């Protein structure tokens, strides 16, 4: 079973190198497609010569357009996209391929991810629950992270469910809504597969991303918007029942700016689910101040 990974790239040279390394050392059969939008930060000085990837350098209309372009070029049975500031943990693709082989009815699988700072130090982690339409729509945040999301080729080849290229920040949530509406079978892979890096310049923190998130939530029925606090509480209850609020100590290995050629191991003695970052929406929208990515 071949896995295709697409990475949209633009002016992220130093992070892209770590991302590529984390995919290249996977033992499962795979291809890594880099869709770069003519970066001018030095990326093009080395990317065209990078033998571990298939690089396509052309202007695009944003991240989701780049992802779609890359997905159309894939030939794998299982697909995924991994941003430049994200990585796969060891043996991730092997475990993903095994899961899909054992669960032929599943088209999309979500796994757990570790969140780190720019130096690769542990901040928190996210364990997924299956997404619900109402929660996804009025929270605009996902019950999982896209770096730990994997799907069968049938999603794009048969169902024609590509990302909405005109969006800039909430394309993942909008895509999940369409998957739910199409009745796509989803499941959970109970293991850590990926790393998300808090670089300080992540897209969701930009003003234009916040504006798009507001518009996305405003597109939901009014009664659903008013129910947002209840939906958030219900989602947190689901996470509580799933045991997400207490995780045993664990360790993981990743590439860092100080160790770009060899993984380093981080031991997590006190795991935490709390992701402290600037609130993408004001408290009046029902989200607690400074609570992380999935309030949810």
Image: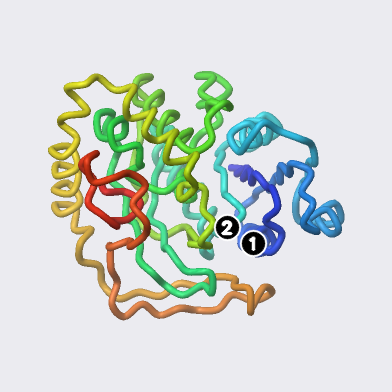
Q: Is residue 98 left or right of residue 216?
A: right
Residue 258 location, quadrant: bottom right
Given residues 127 and 206, the one toward you in this image is 206
Q: Position of residue 209 (x, y in %)?
A: 47, 40
- Residue underneath mark 1: 15
Q: Residues within 10 Å of mark 2 (few under 14, many from 20)?
A: many
- Answer above or below: position of 2 versus 94: above
- Judged from the image, the secondary structure of the residue bearing numbered disc 1 is helix
Q: Position of residue 142 (x, y in %)?
A: 35, 42
Q: Residue 254's mark?
A: none
Q: Are marks 1 and 2 in contact (CB under 8 Å)?
A: yes
- Residue underneath mark 2: 85
Question: For the residues marked 1 and 2, what is the alpha-carbon distance in whole angstroms?
Answer: 5 Å
Q: Is residue 39 left or right of residue 111?
A: right
- Judged from the image, the secondary structure of the residue bearing numbered disc 2 is loop
Q: Is residue 110 left or right of residue 253?
A: left
Q: Earlier in the sequence, mark 1 or mark 2?
A: 1
The residue at 57%/26% (across/down) is 166
Q: Residues within 10 Å of mark 1 (few under 14, many from 20)?
A: many
- Answer above or below: position of 64 versus 45: above
The residue at 69%/64% (across/down) is 14
Residue 122 location, quadrant: bottom left
């Amino acid at each position: 079973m071949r896995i295709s990974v697409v990475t949209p790239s633009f002016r992220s040279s130093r992070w892209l190198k770590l991302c590529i390394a984390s995919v290249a050392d996977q033992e499962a059969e795979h291809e890594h497609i880099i869709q770069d939008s003519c970066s001018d930060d030095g990326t093009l000085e080395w990317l065209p010569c990078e033998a571990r990837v298939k690089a396509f350098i052309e202007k695009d209309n944003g991240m989701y357009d780049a992802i779609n372009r890359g997905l159309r070029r894939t030939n794998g049975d299982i697909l995924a996209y991994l941003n430049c500031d994200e990585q796969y943990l060891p043996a991730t693709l092997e475990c993903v391929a095994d899961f899909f082989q054992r669960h032929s009815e599943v088209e999309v699988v979500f796994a757990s991810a570790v969140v780190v700072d720019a130096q690769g130090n542990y901040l928190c982690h996210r364990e997924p629950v299956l997404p619900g339409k109402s929660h996804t729509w009025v929270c605009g945040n996902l019950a999982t992270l896209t770096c730990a999301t994997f799907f069968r080729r049938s999603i794009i080849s048969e169902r024609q469910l590509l990302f909405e290229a005109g969006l800039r920040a909430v394309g993942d949530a909008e895509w999940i809504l369409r998957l739910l509406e199409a009745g796509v079978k989803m499941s959970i892979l109970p293991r850590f597969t990926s790393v998300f890096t808090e670089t300080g310049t992540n897209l969701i923190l930009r003003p234009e991303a916040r504006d798009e998130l507001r518009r996305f939530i405003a597109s939901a029925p009014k009664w659903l918007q008013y129910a947002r606090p209840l939906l958030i509480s219900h989602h947190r209850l689901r996470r509580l029942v799933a045991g997400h609020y207490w995780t045993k100590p664990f360790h993981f290995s990743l590439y860092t700016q100080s160790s770009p050629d060899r993984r380093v191991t981080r031991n997590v003695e006190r795991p935490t689910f709390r992701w402290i970052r600037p609130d993408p929406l004001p408290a009046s929208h029902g989200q607690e101040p400074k609570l992380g990515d999935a309030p949810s």
